[in-house]
Image (cartoon, rainbow, N blue to C red):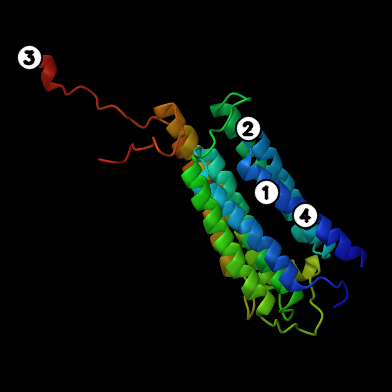
Amino acid sequence: MDSGIQISDILIVTAIMFFIGVYGFVTRKNLIAVMMALELIINAAAINFIMINKLVFKTNLHGVFFGLFIIAVAAVEVAIGLVIILNLYRLRDSIDPEEITTLKH
Amino acid sequence: MTERIIFYILAFIMIVLSLMSVTTTKIVRAAIYLLGVLMGTAGLFFLFNLNFLGAIQLTVYAGGIMVLIVIAILLTHNVGFGLPMPDRRHMLLGWFAAAVGITVAFLEFTRHIFVIGTENLDDRVAKIGADMLHYGEGGFVLPFEVISILLLTGIIAAIVIAKGGIPHKRPTPPSSKQS
């Protein structure tokens, strides 16, 4: 390989990013902060798709397309999620995930 | 060798900034650290000559999503809002889960032998565009259209939800007026 960067190096970096995101996802007490941790997870997954296509399976561009689609879906997901959070804030004056029990009966 | 050094610097920046993003107690700082992680990812793509993906990462993630998140923070918190620290038990359990996951991934990735393809990947922007709109074998026109419909429904749903008007208190029943 020309650049000397192994695929396992990239996979380890993205795995560390992914599990840091998991840590933030389970410990944060604020819905926007939870969503930011979710962005870390999605970003790590997209890097894996793209880099495996670039460095290992080089016959076609399928991983690049999946990376592009993941980025587009992440944009939609963040937009909808933030709109729901803003509406919850308007209704409940709080975005603590422990207090959001509107749909619970 | 230079690329290796740049890669390690980028990886260090990305890991440190993502750690700071999930552990800081100021929510605006968490957003800015996340912006750093996403820009480091774009730098990784540029390092591997994936210029189109790097540009997409910068415009959609660092440009679009981060602006959305920062605006949502500004609409719901004071700028100096401090996030509460997680209690000790949750923190220990979270770090334990993350450490187990990282250990398993590390063992698997270092032991697995990847069969590296020998041919050159044709990743020109023209090839990406042609394959994306190609409807024959290996074409991605159907997911492309599905994603565009998903974006449209996302925009409509965002407008409908953000417009509000969701009643959270029941109106008084009309029978009470007559009595």
* Gap in angstroms between the C-alphas marked 4 and 1: 10 Å
Amino acid at dot 1: Ser
Please indicate whether residue B56 sits to the left or right of residue A19 in the image. Answer: right
If you read the primary sequence from the N terminus, does the residue marked by circle 1 or circle 2 appear first?
1
If you read the primary sequence from the N terminus, does the residue marked by circle 4 or circle 2 appear first?
4
SS under mark 1: helix
Amino acid at dot 4: Phe
Q: Residues within 10 Å of mark 3 (few under 14, many from 20)?
A: few
For discs 4 and 3, the disc positioned in front in the rendered view = 4
* Gap in angstroms between the C-alphas marked 4 and 3: 72 Å
* Gap in angstroms between the C-alphas marked 4 and 2: 22 Å
SS under mark 4: helix
**Residue beneath label 1, please?**
B18
Q: Residues within 10 Å of mark 2 (few under 14, many from 20)?
A: some
SS under mark 2: loop
SS under mark 3: loop
Which residue appears at 12% of the width and 18% of the height? B176
Residue B145, given in percent of the width and then of the height, sits at 57, 62
Amino acid at dot 2: Lys
